[in-house]
Amino acid sequence: MHEVTSFRFNDADPLIRLGRLGEADRLLRECQQVFEDHRDVTRLARVLSTRATLEDALGHREAAADFERTALRLRYARPEPRDIAISHHNLATHLWRADADRGEQRAHRLAAALICQLTGMAHDLAGTQRALAAEMREDGGAGALPAAVAEVVRVAEQTDGVRLGELIAALEPDPRVVEDALAQILRAAADLPPEEDAGIAGHLERWEPVIAAIAAARHGDQEAAAELVQFLDEIAQELDWAVLAGVLRRIVGGERDDRLLDGLDPVDSAIVRETLSRIGRGDPQRP
């Protein structure tokens, strides 16, 4: 049963992106029960993180954050830095979209960035800094950023099960190096240019094949649809594009609501707007 469930769990993301949310919910609940019975903490964390994705697709922002908090707690029980960084990043995004406490939200964003910086995950770090820069611009300075590692740790560890201080110490024992890493992250985010200068056109050009494939898939091109499934699964594993992958899946599944843009940074927003424009908001749903 456990092995079969592990394979069945892989159907959850495709069901969500196809808009079959009820089926996804039933599958995830069944998987959660099996993994709980077998005390499989690693797979249980993945299920709960996927349930957060499902709740976000349903528009339940606070529930999404709650599921990701639980997933994060479980990931600290079996610490793997990249998985933990992803959950911190995802939780920060869910909190942002829920318009939750900015202190908690920023602490988790910076926790993800610190882990990425200290482990050399440059690509993932770039995505986290991009999200942080967009949030700072949108806040207009209203959301104060912790300037010391101790403050990031203190706020992040208010989430049950988070042992960020221990993890950081294991990754880098020298506190001065860690403080320098945080300072670099904050400077890099502050120095990132606004939307007008951030190369939006360049990103749109690079994403043009994907946008075209989504439009083709929505108009019945099965080959394009099959290629999209594989591509979106791949980019969903990257911090830089994970949120965008989820939104594009929802578009492929038929969503057109303006809420798709909630919480997106400028680059992701531009890509989603162009995709929706290409499909046509008034375009009838076609198989």
Image (cartoon, rainbow, N blue to C red):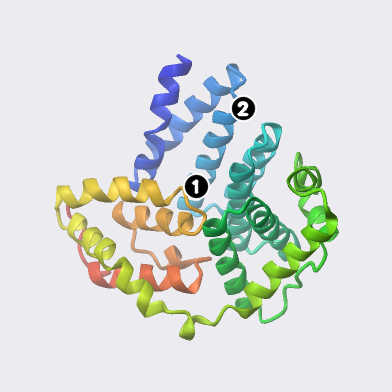
Which disc is residue 53 wearing?
Answer: 1
- The residue mark sitting in front, 2 or 1, is 2
Instruction: Tell me: 27 left or right of 166.
Output: left
Q: Give the mark nearest the N terminus, 2 or 1.
A: 2
Instruction: Tell me: 219 left or right of 253.
Output: left
The image quarter containing residue 175 is bottom right
- The x and y percentages for residue 59 are 50, 55
Of residues 176 and 185, the one nearer the viewer is 176
Q: Which residue is mark 2?
A: 41
Tally of numbered discs: 2
- The x and y percentages for residue 197 are 48, 85
Q: In which quadrant of the rendered image does the N terminus lie?
A: top left
In the current view of this chain or complex, which residue is farthest to the bottom? 196
The image quarter containing residue 7 is top left
Which disc is residue 118 wearing?
Answer: none
Rendered view: 179 above or below 90: below
- Cα separation, mark 2 vs mark 1, equals 19 Å
At label 2, which amino acid type do we have? Val
Of residues 219 and 286, the one nearer the viewer is 219
Instruction: Tell me: 160 left or right of 275.
Output: right
Instruction: Tell me: 252 left or right of 179.
Output: left
